[in-house]
Image: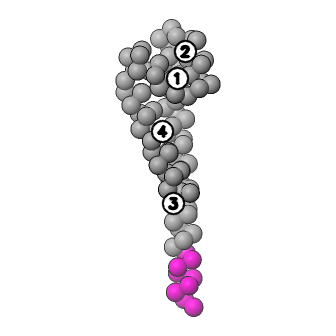
Amino acid sequence: MQSESVRCAVIVSAEAVTTLVLVLCFAALVTVHVATVYGLFARRAPALALFGMLVPPVALVGAFLRGMRVRAVLWLLAASLYGSALWLAS
């Protein structure tokens, strides 16, 4: 009987960790995306920034084209981590 409760606790713990990873990856993606859009506004590309806010991959391309390579790589990394975490959670 005890082994069943331990097994159940491990499953709940794994679900909690999965949920935490998903939330953190999504928060990182949103943070990098907003920073990228802000950078596009600051670099005098308001049309690209507005379109990038509505269609997120446009912000990634705009960041590469406007010389914000670090933000673009961070955006791509955060999106990849979030996608991987979402795939593992399903």
Q: Which numbered mark, 3 or 1, is in the foreground of this view?
A: 1
Q: What is the distance, in whole Å, between disc 3 and disc 1 at their CAs?
A: 31 Å
Mark 1 or mark 2: which comes first in sequence? 2
**In what element is the residue under mark 2?**
helix
Tell me which amino acid carries mark 1. Val
Q: What is the distance, in whole Å, between disc 1 and disc 2 at their CAs?
A: 8 Å
Where residue 78 appears, as percent x and y from the top left, is 45, 39
Q: Locate the C terminus by quadrant.
A: bottom right
Mark 2 or mark 3: which comes first in sequence? 3
Q: Mark 2 points at which residue?
A: 48
Tell me which amino acid carries mark 3. Val
Q: In this view, does 58 lie above or below 1?
A: above
Q: Name the residue under label 3.
A: 17
Left/right of residue 73 with respect to residue 87 in the rendered view: left
Q: Which mark is residue 79?
A: 4
Q: Which mark is residue 58?
A: 1
Residue 2 included in the magenta stretch of the image: yes
